[in-house]
Image: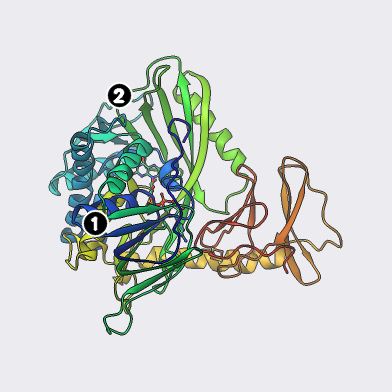
Amino acid sequence: MATTGRTDYPALGGSRRVDTAVVGGGIAGVTAALHCAEAGQEVALLESDRIVEGVTGRTTAKVTAQHGLIYDDLLDRHGRTAARQYAAANAAAVEEIADRVVAHDIDCDFRRLPAYTYAASDDQRAAVEREATVAEGLDLPATYTADPPFPAETPGAVEFEAQAQFHPRKYLLALADEISDSGGATIFEQTTVTGVEDRGDGSGSPCRVETERGTVTADSVLLTTHFPIEDPAFYFARQYPKRSYVLAVRLAEDPPEGMFYRDEEPYFSVRPHPTADGPIALVGGQNHKTGQGGSTADRYRKLERQARDHFDVESVEYRWSTQDYVSVDRIPFVGELGPTTDGVYVATGFGGWGMTNGTAAGKMLAAFARGTTPRWADAFDPTRIDLEASGRVLLSENVNVGKEFTGDWAKSPFRGADPEVAPGEGEVVRRGGKQLAVARDEAGELHVTSAVCTHLNCIVHWNDAEGSWDCPCHGSRFSIDGKVLDGPAVEDLPERGE
Ligand SMILES: Cc1cc2nc3c(=O)[nH]c(=O)nc-3n(C[C@H](O)[C@H](O)[C@H](O)COP(=O)(O)OP(=O)(O)OC[C@H]3O[C@@H](n4cnc5c(N)ncnc54)[C@H](O)[C@@H]3O)c2cc1C
Ligand code: FES
């Protein structure tokens, strides 16, 4: 965000008829819109704010089919065909990005590097070895190495050769230029979509996309809003929000050559990144479920300690956090939005690996929009219900939500007047039968809103690092004055619980 300029595409003005409307301008939406434009379609890409400033603008941007220890698990849960489709889709996405960088001559720090998932301890060594064997069996470029080039004690790692990293905004803003130069496609920013209607009754009428600035009618709608703004298929119960933290640290020595990941709770991730003043390392981790797990400011402190344990850190140049959704069976949802919807397609649940999953999803969504069924569609089918593959996690995630709901409604203290909160702090209190979220901003102004999440009525928690109200149930986030920052909620928290 600090090393690229802001975009300035116009807002929608009035109504439009297009072949395909794409809602949301992250990696999935921009890639989908470009594929549609390349197929000669008339496209409207509608973004509520500015493109590539959501999760995609705050990622760590490893471009790899290596997603921690996943392939052995996918094989076990879903069988060989689905595991192979997931592997093929993500491996093809690495190559699609590499090809586009060359074809469009995009200056985006794209660089081939090996990816390593290293064992955290001797106990994990066998799992890492098995992952290497399974991944190789799925035609991925995987080997086991006992000696990865990483400054930590580890018994070994699975290595994927010739993976990549890039600057996601430089890459996607160049794709956005291609979209707007294509003639048939238009990007509209500052245009929030408030509702989507599908083709419905088979009468041949188009889908309708309602915005605050006009209506777009389209043969197909591609919902790429990170969490889908329409939820007829209970996505909120089939994926959970994983929030994590990144530090950009300047080191006394060059960072290690490669992209590294330790698949533990919490995970730990490192990759080098070039800057004009020499390389820095992006260090990530300290993940937790959004709205749960105590002080978020503490997560940055812990991550910095971990970085200093591994490296000689001279300075912390940048820090940020964001969240991604993980599906309960570990495969994203890409395809028809619901079992009875017609013409509306979704991509969500990238599990922290959206550079490749989002690129693959963009290609698949564009195929659906052309009326064809893409390769890999079966594995990613959002309407799949496989209790064996998702059952245990599905159950535990929803029990966790139930506990948060019942625990928090009883927990907050009664207060007759607004509590004394210091700048940068927030507290939930009960008053006159209402649950109120009371917080003071850094300038000293007090903000009081309802503390009841507008999604499904859980009580929000204060996020002391970001100064936001975060819901522990399904990951909605709200600004200090109640504006929706992240779905599934689509309505703001009312002021003073009105
Ligand atoms: C800390 C962290 C590190 C990560 N690192 C990696 C990594 O190294 N490699 C990797 O592969 N993946 C990584 N990921 C995951 C990856 O960043 C995400 O999966 C991906 O960016 C999600 O892209 P998206 O297009 O779905 O969402 P977004 O980028 O969030 O795009 C959604 C867009 O929709 C817009 N929108 C929302 N609602 C509306 C509406 N009503 N109307 C119009 N527009 C709307 C939003 O404003 C936003 O611009 C990481 C994730 C995290 C949290
Ligand atoms: S996000 Fe579902 S209740 Fe808040």
Q: In what element is the residue under mark 2?
A: loop
Residue of label 2: 257
For the residue pair 267 and 17, the one nearer the viewer reads as 17
Amino acid found under the numbered disc labelled 1? Cys
Name the residue: 35% across, 75% down: 198
Kindly indicate the quadrant of the structure image that contains residue 37: bottom left
Name the residue: 35% across, 40% down: 173
Residue at the far front: name it: 14
Q: Position of residue 205 (x, y in %)?
A: 30, 79
Q: Report, in whole angstroms, how far the alpha carbon at label 1 lies from the one at label 2.
A: 37 Å
Of pointers 1 and 2, the one earlier in the residue sequence: 1
For the residue pair 317 and 218, the one nearer the viewer reads as 218
Q: Position of residue 443 (x, y in %)?
A: 75, 40
Name the residue: 22% across, 37% down: 104
- Tell me the quarter of the image containing the C terminus: bottom right
Q: Position of residue 59 (x, y in %)?
A: 41, 41
Q: Is 181 left, or right, of 402 in this rendering?
A: left
Q: Position of residue 138 (x, y in %)?
A: 15, 49
Of badges 1 and 2, nearer the viewer stands: 1
> Can residue 148 be seen at all in this image of the molecule?
yes
Q: In what element is the residue under mark 1?
A: helix
Amino acid found under the numbered disc labelled 2? Glu
| Residue 36, numbered label | 1
For the residue pair 321 and 409, the one nearer the viewer reads as 321
Kindly indicate the quadrant of the structure image that contains residue 150: top left
Look at the picture and state if 68 lies above or below 146.
Answer: below
